[in-house]
Image: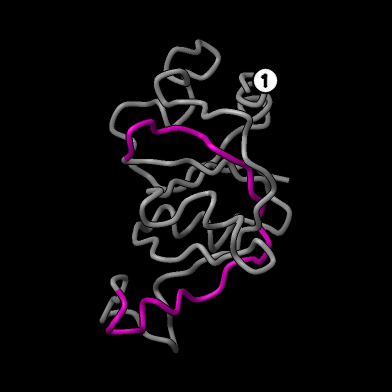
Amino acid sequence: MQYWLMKSEPEAFSIDDLAGRPKQTEHWDGVRNYQARNMMRDEMKIGDQVFFYHSNCELPGIVGIAEVARESYPDFTAFDPDDKHFDPKSNPDKPTWFMVDIKFVRKLQRTISLQELKQQQALTELALVRRGNRLSIMPITPQQWDFILGLE
């Protein structure tokens, strides 16, 4: 099993939105960064654990846990000209963009803020706290996962 952190702006899609979906499951669409796409396409497997992170909000931080419920498949939003994630260069016969489905596991008892994460000596190698890292999806080591859960 692997561990991940996936960012979403809560105004666009929040942990509560995920919890409210049928079967508490939703596709993770709209990723338009090749490195993040490659992680979803090549590395994410069913059962992998995910920290759900709220970004670009009053209190950015980890707010819940989800798990990968379906491995990668073409991101159909790239083919829809009416969708905000449309990519005219992406082709259904040879898709550029992929997505996975994630399933709600639980909300954390509290938000573990970005500020708090940055203060932890044990997390200096966490991609999220490194300067200049803007990826919406990133791997988490098992040790980082356990440490962050211990902060809850």
Q: Quadrant of residue 103?
A: bottom right
Q: Quadrant of residue 150?
A: top right
| Secondary structure of the residue carrying numbered label 1 | helix
Give the colouring mode of the picture.
one colour
Residue at left offset 54%, top offset 44%:
52
Q: Is residue 55 left or right of residue 6?
A: left
Coordinates of residue 147 in the picture (x, y in percent) = 64, 21
Q: How many marks?
A: 1
Residue at left offset 37%, top offset 58%:
34
Neighbour tally class for label 1: few under 14, some 14-19, many 20 plus, Cα within 10 Å: few
User: Which image quarter holds the C terminus?
Assistant: top right
Residue that numbered label 1 is attached to: 150
Coordinates of residue 111 in the picture (x, y in percent) = 52, 29
Q: In the image, is residue 32 part of the stretch drawn in magenta?
A: no
Task: Give the magenta-colored segment's residue range.
Answer: 57-83
Coordinates of residue 108 in the picture (x, y in percent) = 62, 34
Between 65 and 125, the residue placed more toward the observer is: 65
Residue at left offset 63%, top offset 43%:
65
Give above or below for 42 relative to 75. above
Between 12 and 80, the residue placed more toward the observer is: 12
Coordinates of residue 79 in the picture (x, y in percent) = 36, 83
